[in-house]
Amino acid sequence: MSHPGGRPAPPPGPPAAAGPALRGLADLLPAVARVLGVPGQAEGAGWLVGPLAGVRHVVVLLVDGLGARQLAEHAALAPGLAGLPELGPLAAPFPSSTAISLASLGTGLPPGMHGIVGSSFRLEDGTVLAPLSWAEEPNPIATQPEPTLLERAAAAGVHVVTAAPAAHRHSGLTRAALRGGQYPGAESVEDRVRVAVAAIAAARATGTASLVYAYWPDLDKAGHLHGVDSPAYRGELARVEVLVAGLAALAGPDVALLVTADHGLLDVPDDRRIDLEALPALRDGVVTILGEPRVRHVYAEPGRAGAVLDTWRRVLGAHVDVLARDEVDGLLGPVDPWHAERIGDVVAIAREDWALVSDRVDRLVSSLRGQHGGLTPAEVEVPLRLARG
């Protein structure tokens, strides 16, 4: 592992973004809800009305770790998916990681409003929350009280079903961000297709619209462990192709399949891993470091935030954008004052394919080859593909 200690701080300025402004992942379910007749959607939610004209049943498949750029680079392995008409790409929220993206998808809100601001972060009372391992406490609904799009659709009479692993049914993240409707549990490709078929049939039998949310996690796991051009990642993408084919076969005049993702991935070379443990100055005035290797939330001792900011900028140099809390607002969208203290006093965002690793903070996650969370197009841009009969 390497570190660039002693480099001068970069000139002030905003971090590099993903490119031209894109619709966000948070815009997707409000647009689907409007198509299905759920009241209360904003005027801007009408962007799917044309592509989904006549649709009464929508299946939204989210493939964890399938960035738009990874799909383009591996199109030959998933020709059916890659050949579907494009409605995107969409932009994952910041940080571009699963918990944040699923919360924005489920609520239709930016992270600053739903309050899930990192892969791990500190709540107002000082409790550390890691949303992917969230169980009973803190209370998920108290932590994220805004109604979800699945709840709102179900309340409006839409038949809402989630097709995802049974182990996720009662997780804190599901209850915070994706609560609402039925959740029968679906483990395999075939299970997910079966759940979607049953949901559409049940809705037709009662003359109602339906919304199926399906989640597939395995591609992301392969990318983390082995990299985004590894045989394991390529093999998992071939399985995604089978799932997409099974769900696309359901498409018809009144049924649409939308395929998207929560984030992309990039590989971090060994010589671009900045070892935080090798830089003891970064601990001066710091209570705790959270987040993930591409984005670190740094919480300072009372009265030390300015000094910590200066030190992190001086030590980390040009490979990391180091921002004060109030400089992150634009990246997180509008920030509810209730959630402001969840954001680190200092937020460090690795540029290019660098990472801020730490055996003390998150040894396993820091060791992974594939990473995400940052602002590069490879991480932020996610596909949105449409299958219709």
Image (tube, grey):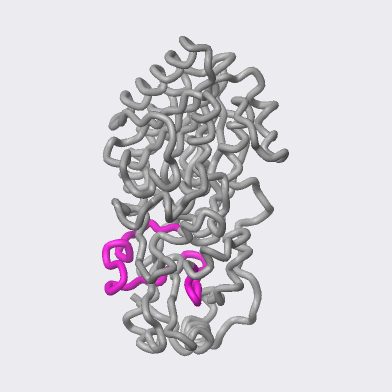
Above/below status of 68 relative to 307:
above
Decide if residue 118 is on the left or right side of residue 35: left
Q: Quadrant of residue 302?
A: bottom left
Decide if residue 311 is on the left or right side of residue 283: right
Q: Position of residue 335 (x, y in %)?
A: 59, 62
Q: Nearer the viewer, residue 37 or 385?
A: 37
Residue 60, visible in the rendered structure: yes
Above/below status of 165 relative to 21:
above
Q: Nearer the viewer, residue 210 or 54?
A: 210
Give the residue at x 58% y 68%: 328
Residue 225, visible in the rendered structure: no
Above/below status of 138 relative to 183:
below
- Quadrant position of the N terminus in the picture: bottom left
- Quadrant position of the C terminus in the picture: top right
Tell me if residue 363 is in the magenta stretch. yes
Q: Position of residue 69 (x, y in %)?
A: 53, 47
For the magenta stretch, what is the residue range? 343-372
Q: Count the numbered circles shown.
A: 0
Give the residue at x 69% y 35%: 47
Q: Position of residue 96 (x, y in %)?
A: 49, 55
Above/below status of 126 relative to 176:
below
Give the residue at x 62% y 26%: 37
